Amino acid sequence: MTRVAILGGGPGGYESALVAAQLGADVTLVERDGPGGACVLTDCVPSKTLIATSTRMAVLSESVSLGVRFSGGSDGEVGGPEVDLPLVNKRVKELAWAQSADIESRVADEGVRIIRGAGRLVDPQIVAVGDERIHADVVLIATGATPRVLPGAEPDGERILNWRQLYDLPELPEDLIVVGSGVTGAEFAGAYLALGSRVTLVSSRDHVLPNEDEDAARVLEEVFQRRGMNLLARSRAAGVKRTADGVEVTLTDGRTVTGSHCLMTVGMEPNTRGMGLEEAGVRLDERGFVQVDKVSRTSAPHVYAAGDCTGILMLASVAAMQGRIAMWHALGEAVQPLKLGWVAANIFTDPEVATVGVSQAQIDSGEVPARIVKLPLSTNPRAKMQGFLDGFVKIFCRPATGIVLGGVIVAPRASELILGLSIAVQQHLTVDQVAHTFAVYPSVSGSITEAARRLMQESAY
Ligand SMILES: Cc1cc2nc3c(=O)[nH]c(=O)nc-3n(C[C@H](O)[C@H](O)[C@H](O)COP(=O)(O)OP(=O)(O)OC[C@H]3O[C@@H](n4cnc5c(N)ncnc54)[C@H](O)[C@@H]3O)c2cc1C
């Protein structure tokens, strides 16, 4: 029986444990904090649970235009929804630990042995946890990553925070400064704005979401500003310090911004140091990420790696797929190498931004020849009825054949809508095939088939 040892119990680790156990291996999973990993306990699951509340708040706040009236306001003012942050945080933490417990029993049911503790390699085929030694034929490193700390802006857990400390806040920040306008910064800035905080988003670049679809970033910026967010572009934070009653962020050009709290979202660092990896022959890049190939092999024989510690594409779905591929490969199953071009991703802002396949930047640079159609949500009947007018559906296809290459959807619940395009990309469907597919009337997904029809018409000329 092949012995498999896995370091880290996030999606990269526990999904591989399930695959390896189902393939008949003897599997040991070593996890420091709790099954499910940072994904379930501090990052993805908690943030999406918080966002479930903030999205509900945004819907309620904007429902006045649909004829909903709130009563119960004081001094002649109309009442509105209010958030009970301790209750929200309690729900977030309980849900995360319940999810972790579900994963633990699922993994244990498959016969995986779980060891609580921090593991390290003493040899490419020996894992140590305290005094215990686990001898393995195959080792998988899936130890994830940790929030990066900007020197001079060290979190104190009270006023200067990383996102893992947010769920201990006793009350809603009155005046939140979010440093960093990537996916994590944009999601939390939008969420706390909807929950009722005043929010300033400090971005070192020209726009929010600098690495995402430009049209999508523009829509979000407009929505954020319309809802009252203070956006500071081309503003790089140099340091953050506590004041008597809050925080002061100093920018590199000398300006200062004051608020009640500051949330730092300036990236992640891999959990790979001090674990004996390099000594065992596992090559790290200059930032400390484990170098892997498309079947998750590292430079050390029998040692694989998956997930955020590889820095490939920091998503739970990618971590899980890298881990499964590693186990299929190690245990002699047929395996398809990781294809990043097929990854569907979503930014959980309001509206959401979902993408799959090639990007418009690749098309604009000439790297990928493609035709593009973009339909604004304001032309979609269902969106009009629901009062959601910010967003669009955009599809890219090959010029001659009409094969769908990718797309972007900016809409409420875009994460649920992208599947249709994802299937089209992975199965090499043409815009004709998508156009001939029934969509419900009225529905936002009707804009996907409508966009495909427009691309079909274009190819007829
Ligand atoms: C705020 C936020 C929101 C996110 N939202 C989403 C989302 O909506 N969708 C999505 O797809 N992705 C999301 N992500 C990304 C996602 O959380 C990560 O890509 C995912 O957690 C990576 O999984 P992993 O298994 O590599 O690592 P992790 O989930 O980080 O798990 C690694 C585990 O290994 C443990 N560990 C570390 N060192 C050791 C050791 N020496 N021995 C034993 N155990 C060890 C750690 O304690 C941790 O529990 C989000 C990330 C953040 C920061």
Image: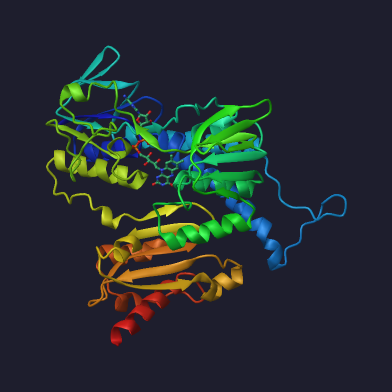
Where in the figure is residue 45, as x and y percent of width and height?
Answer: 47, 41
Q: Residue at x 27, y 46 (%)?
A: 321
Outermost residue, right side: 75
Outermost residue, front side: 253
| Nearest the eye: 439 or 42 | 42
| Rendered image quadrant of residue 367 | bottom left
| Nearest the eye: 3 or 294 | 294
| Rendered image quadrant of residue 76 | bottom right
Q: In which quarter of the image is the N terminus?
A: top left
Above/below status of 165 relative to 363: above
Above/below status of 53 relative to 141: below
Residue 412 seen in the current view:
no
Q: Residue at x 51, y 61 (%)?
A: 219
| Rendered image quadrant of residue 137 | top left
Which quadrant of the figure shows ligand 1?
Answer: top left
Q: In which quarter of the image is the C terminus?
A: bottom left
Exactly how many numbered labels are in the figure? 0
Residue 43 seen in the current view:
yes
| Nearest the eye: 74 or 2 | 74
Q: Residue at x 34, y 74 (%)?
A: 434
